Image (cartoon, rainbow, N blue to C red):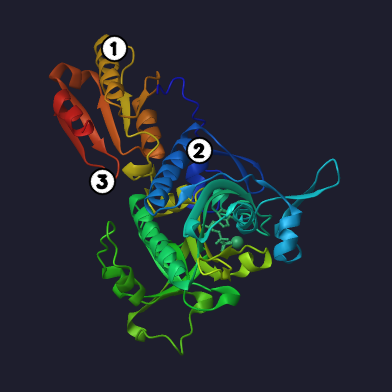
Amino acid sequence: MRLSVFFLPTLKETPAEAQIVSHRLMLRAGMIHQESAGIYSWLPLGIRVLKKIEGIIRAEQDGAGAQEILMPTIQSADIWRESGRYDDYGREMLRITDRHDREMLYGPTNEEMVTGILRDHLRSYRDLPLMLYHIQWKFRDEVRPRFGIMRGREFLMKDCYSFDLDFEGSKRAYNAMFAAYLRTFARLGLKAVPVVADPGAIGGNMSHEFHILAETGESTIFYDAAYDDLDLDMENPDIEALRGIYAAEEEKHDPADCPVPPERLKQAKGIEVGHIFYFGTKYSKSMGLTVTKADGEEITPEMGSYGIGVSRLPAAIIEASHDENGIVWPDSVAPFQVGLVNLKTNDADCLALCEDIYARLENAGIETLYDDRDERPGAKFANMDLIGLPWQLVVGPRGVKAGTVELKRRASGEKEELSLDSALARLIP
Ligand code: ATP
Ligand code: MG
């Protein structure tokens, strides 16, 4: 992509309304545009990151054996009356009436709808176990939408639902999702702490939230310092060992009962990026979802739900990965891998070399943002640092004469003068 035509409305000034660094940087880098409180448009740079995140989540959900579906954003109030949540949900639910005066709503979550799908189509106990997920926009009329897309009213969520014949099956589904979440967050360049969360009315220990440690987090968590020293094998996380390490959200943390000695107990702020949750037959029972086993016994499937805050994640990643000059994207979610900077667009040799490099990178499938604008070098460098692409490849008249280019790694700031071929060899696998 040529920067001269790319729609990248960056801001020089720090927007006054943004209280936390991720919100400031997302606005300054031209990733999002506010439409109203807690409702945002995603601009080209932002949507590229969001799609990358979605792709990683999707791959790990598929890998865990979940199947993708897509349920609508607008739901009928009827199914929510069946589960009894229509009145309970209160003012967070955006209620809509259609032209026939039918009560509709913009879905804040999809337990009712997915249970309804299974009720209509589950024919045999052999169809279970089953995990279905979708990645869809939700609406919750939050009391205090803030921090940009971190706490939006309209936000993108991955929500997965498991259906099993018995508790043992549910436990397997839960563990599969637990592992998939650890892998997902690791691939996003994040260290997520799984904390024991409130299981609601069901009880038991099958409710975990995944938190990214950050000063700006809205949750308070308590955890064993042993977690900080833990070198996690994300490809094959030892879930039982991990669960053995104490970590709990504030409401679940009881100092009197805490197994961690005070000198090892840490308190921190966390950003909740995921929540997995077993709730038994809560929805299957109230909505009459049953299946007949081989021996003729009719059973009510056990369910769990597994959410990830997809549109919260770009902000969480920025909170965890930025410096005073801007965003530092992990390679896996970067909107482009390489920023190619032409320092002198009116120099024929610089121009020819840049065009050649750009074509070679594009042909190799390396996503490249090519700054071909007629701008001061200082402004170009600041812009590249702000948008945080992992690599900057800088071409200037002096280098062209010497046969070299400069390769900069955004994360470390390390710069190297290299021949064009060695620079390209670094970037093209
Ligand atoms: P929170 O405590 O942050 O309000 P929640 O407990 O209401 O979250 P869930 O219902 O478990 O959240 O939703 C699953 C995930 O969706 C959360 O872990 C979070 O990452 C994300 N999420 C929830 N509410 C919002 C929101 N208003 N804006 C962006 N992401 C959200
Ligand atoms: Mg909430």
**Amino acid type for the residue under numbered disc 1:** Asp
Q: Position of residue 34 (x, y in %)?
A: 62, 41
Residue at 52% in and 31% down? 9
Residue 79 on image: x %, y %: 71, 57
**Numbered badge on residue 412:** 3
Quarter placement of the C terminus: top left
Depth check: give the residue in front, 248 or 37.
248
User: Tag 2's secondary structure?
Assistant: loop
Q: Which residue is label 1 attached to?
A: 347
Camera-nearest residue between 34 and 405: 34
Q: Earlier in the sequence, mark 3 or mark 1?
A: 1
- Dot in front, 2 or 3: 2
Task: Examine the rendered structure and indicate whether residue 112 appears above or below residue 365.
Answer: below
The CB of the residue at mark 3 lies under 8 Å from ligand 1: no
Q: Is residue 417 left or right of residue 358?
A: left
Are the two marked residues, 2 and 3, in contact with CB atoms closer than 8 angstroms?
no
* Residue sitting at the far front: 295
User: Residue 167, position in %: x, y?
Assistant: 48, 72
Mark earlier in primary sequence (2, 3): 2
In this view, the residue in front, 6 or 313, is 313
Label 2 sits on what residue type? Met
Return the residue at label 2. 31
| Relative to 218, residue 313 above or below | above
Quarter holding ligand 1: bottom right
- List x then y, in percent, for residue 383: 40, 33
Q: Quadrant of the N terminus?
A: top left
Label 3 element class: loop
The residues bearing labels 2 and 1 have C-alpha atoms spaced at a distance of 32 Å
- Tell me if residue 57 can be seen: yes
